[in-house]
Amino acid sequence: SYTKERLQFDRTIASFQAIKHKAADMMLKVESARSLLYYAACTVDAWSVGQVNDEALLEAAYMASACASDAAFFNAGSGIQMHGGVGITEEYDIQLYFKRARATESFLGRPSDMRESLASQLLDGAAPWATSRWRAAQAASRCATRLGSRSTSLRTAGLRARAGSPRPRAATL
């Protein structure tokens, strides 16, 4: 909405092609992350009835987690750029999204770590830090937390119960 209000050269900045391209890139990132989240949710459903193994669950969770984190950070940064100088002030909430994206990345793991774990799992057969059902549930929970999906979070709560381990208390941001 800010891009529709801000005038530059007697026209709104939303009418500039560069802004449209940036908005299209932002939408592409979100839709890619959403598609991977849906795939991960379907994999969780199949895993819960025994149709897929733990490795497939981890693979889906790693992919969705890395893509969601990339999308959150890219979109927050692009939003600040589209807002210009006022993007980092407290007048607009876009600076909060940027801070949350960075904090979430630090708290839940960097996308590069997720991709490294995925590559390790695919090439070596098992991810170095994810060898149990509890780790699989943690990876799925990270994915759900990144995109804020309530239904997937409920499914992962069931995974935790099935894994036989309670979830440790997480620090609040």
Image (cartoon, helix red, strand yellow):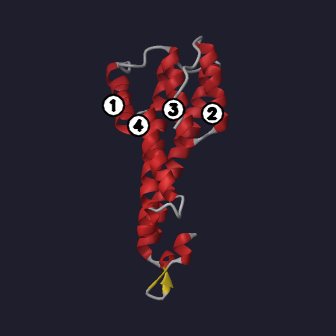
- The numbered disc on residue 3 is none
Q: Position of residue 127 (x, y in %)?
A: 38, 21
What amino acid type should be assigned to the residue bearing mark 4? Ser
Name the residue at 54% across, 20% down.
Answer: 168
What amino acid type should be assigned to the residue bearing mark 1? Glu
Query: How many C-alpha atoms fall within 10 Å of the one at disc 1: few (<14), some, or many (≥20)?
Result: some
What amino acid type should be assigned to the residue bearing mark 3? Arg
- The numbered disc on residue 142 is 3
Q: Position of residue 29 (x, y in %)?
A: 47, 52
Q: Kindly report the distance in space between the C-alpha atoms of the residues bearing marks 1 and 2.
A: 24 Å
Residue denoted by label 4: 106
Residue denoted by label 1: 116
Instruction: Return the residue nearer the eye: 162 or 55.
Output: 162
Whether residue 21 is visible, yes or no, is no
The disc, 3 or 1, on the residue closer to the chain's N-terminal end is 1
Q: Kindly report the distance in space between the C-alpha atoms of the residues bearing marks 1 and 4.
A: 16 Å
Place residue 172 in its image quadrant. Answer: top right
The disc, 1 or 4, on the residue closer to the chain's N-terminal end is 4
Query: How many C-alpha atoms fall within 10 Å of the one at disc 3: few (<14), some, or many (≥20)?
Result: many
| Left or right position of 84 against 90 | left
The disc, 3 or 4, on the residue closer to the chain's N-terminal end is 4
Residue denoted by label 2: 152
Q: What element does badge 2 sit on?
A: helix
